[in-house]
Amino acid sequence: MSHEIHEHDVLVIGAGGAGLRAAIEASALGVSVGLVSKSLLGKAHTVMAEGGMAASLGNTDDRDDWKMHFRDTIRGGKMMGNWKMVEIFAKEAPDRVNELEEWGALFDRTEDGRIAQRNFGGHRYPRLAHVGDRTGLEMIRTLQNHGIHQGVDIYMECTIVELLMDGDRIAGAFGYWRESGKFVIFKAKAVILATGGVGKCYRFTSNSWECTGDGQALAYRAGASLVGMEFVQFHPTGMIWPPSVRGVLVTEGVRGDGGILKNNLGERFMFNYIPEMFAAETADTVEEASRWLEKDPNARRPPELLTRDVVARSIRAERLAGRGSPHGGAFLDIASQRSPEYIKRKLPSMYHQFKHLGNLDITKEPMEVGPTCHYIMGGVLVDPETAGSDVPGLYSAGEAAGGLHGANRLGGNSLTDLIVFGRRAGQYAAEYAKSLKSSIKISDAQLKQVEKVAIAPFEDSGKENPYQVFQDLQSCMELNSGIVRVKSELETCLVELEKLKERAAKVKVEGNRHFNSGWHYALDLRNLLTVSEAISLSALHREESRGGHTREDFPDSTEKFEKVITIVKEKGGKMTWKHEPKSEMPEELKELLA
């Protein structure tokens, strides 16, 4: 117990939108709160979210309401979203967005001064409140400015290695300072996981370096269940050329503001991927459906704004048909649709970053884009009301939690998810911490075991290079458990992951713990291997195609699998899976889907 120790009622791991909102709420309820950030405060992956946050404010189209948002989210998630979570989300989203405005968020405005809303894929009405194409950055700025006055203790550049337990309940977390390598112990009655996604499992990803599945893996090793891990979203428009901007996301706002997708023949191909039934279900009117099927470029809502899974698979189909761009994607063209002044005003970040980083002027030439790993719909299994896991004292919110988005997330729903369920996680974690009468106890044996795991890469006699194992893991997932999957490749992936686990156990790190990036990679590998196995195992046993999960050997969605969710849990040192029946949706909510 000679390590640095900090004690709080509630410990929040992750300082993005969900973590900040959770910390603000918990602190407002009068408990001691610690906020751990893997990077510097303000550098969370949330800042990369560009297009906007979805809420049925009805400012641009007064026909919109929470019921329509509920309908779009359930249908966009291919009927797999937890209906209670979606109901809470759709009802509370407007209040959370208005709350951000009260705290100082500077949204774009309508002519009469209300928050402006834009079209986005899968949303029937213009629903995304936005700040140009820098909405996530504005969210973080607002939450930070508000949160630093709430008495929250902030611990930056700190990586959590393991959650600590007191029997079967949470007791805190064990981590290290990235700069010095010194260990630190956080004692806490409740822990909130808000660590984001798993994108670094894949070679092409829009995710930042922090997104190594920490929250999902930490929860799994603590005994919590994971749900829906097979559902990984590949955003259709990530930059694939030039190399200097590879993986950088091209916001859906580019398509929402008029950008169109073309193949190497100059054809606007998305009209070819709208089956008659899909057009009838998705379009606002019969007239709009007819325009889509007739390939009318003047359709009110362009086919480029179909759900992300549809657009991503369409780009892939064009590439396989030999009509792809030179580097294996498609061309996203807004230059021919909008004036340079309009593009610079509405999409300033897009214009400046590609101009300066890639020497590409999007006001004059198209972007070369393709599917890139963007988001995981699966995560920690949580209670819809409380955001609590099945481990006492452990909560989760944001991308680290599963259930809300089902099989496919609609663009813009992620930012609102952060503030809706970040708030709930903070509220119920604080109430749980207040309810505990006994003190938290952490055994010396547990601490010694975690420390042993943390320093093993320095003491191991193996010769594996952590960077090479990291790259081989990404290649394995890209080839065998990527955007399109088949049984044989998934089985191969699981076999290869076992081999990679053995190699990861033999990783050798040179030098000392002082800002040793090789050591950081070695510890991140534990989490990446865990979530990669969860993704592949869940994908193997869902024998259908649905949303972000596409099985080439089972191309259709089936009623059988629509009724079950995939649960992954640790038992006896091994990862186990089961299909569990979904809870039945009430009749009054079913009627909204008709």
Image (spheres, rainbow, N blue to C red):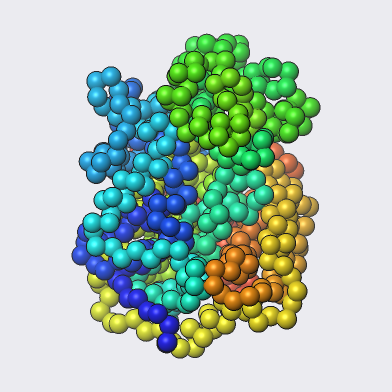
Q: In which quadrant is the C terminus drawn?
A: top left
279 w.r.t. 456: above or below: above
Q: Residue at x 33, y 22 (%)?
A: 61
Q: Is residue 589 left or right of residue 102?
A: right
367 w.r.t. 447: above or below: above
Q: Quadrant of residue 40?
A: bottom left
Q: Residue at x 74, y 77 (%)?
A: 462
Q: In which quadrant is the N terminus drawn?
A: bottom left
Number of numbered discs overlaid on the protein picture: 0
Q: Where in the figure is residue 265, as x and y percent of width and height?
A: 73, 18
Quick check: can you spot residue 51?
no
Q: Residue at x 52, y 11 (%)?
A: 298
Front position in the image: 103 or 56: 103
Q: Residue at x 41, y 63 (%)?
A: 156
Q: Quadrant of residue 566?
A: bottom right
Q: Where in the figure is residue 505, as x and y percent of width and height?
A: 69, 74
66 w.r.t. 177: above or below: above
Q: Where in the figure is residue 429, as x and y percent of width and height?
A: 32, 64
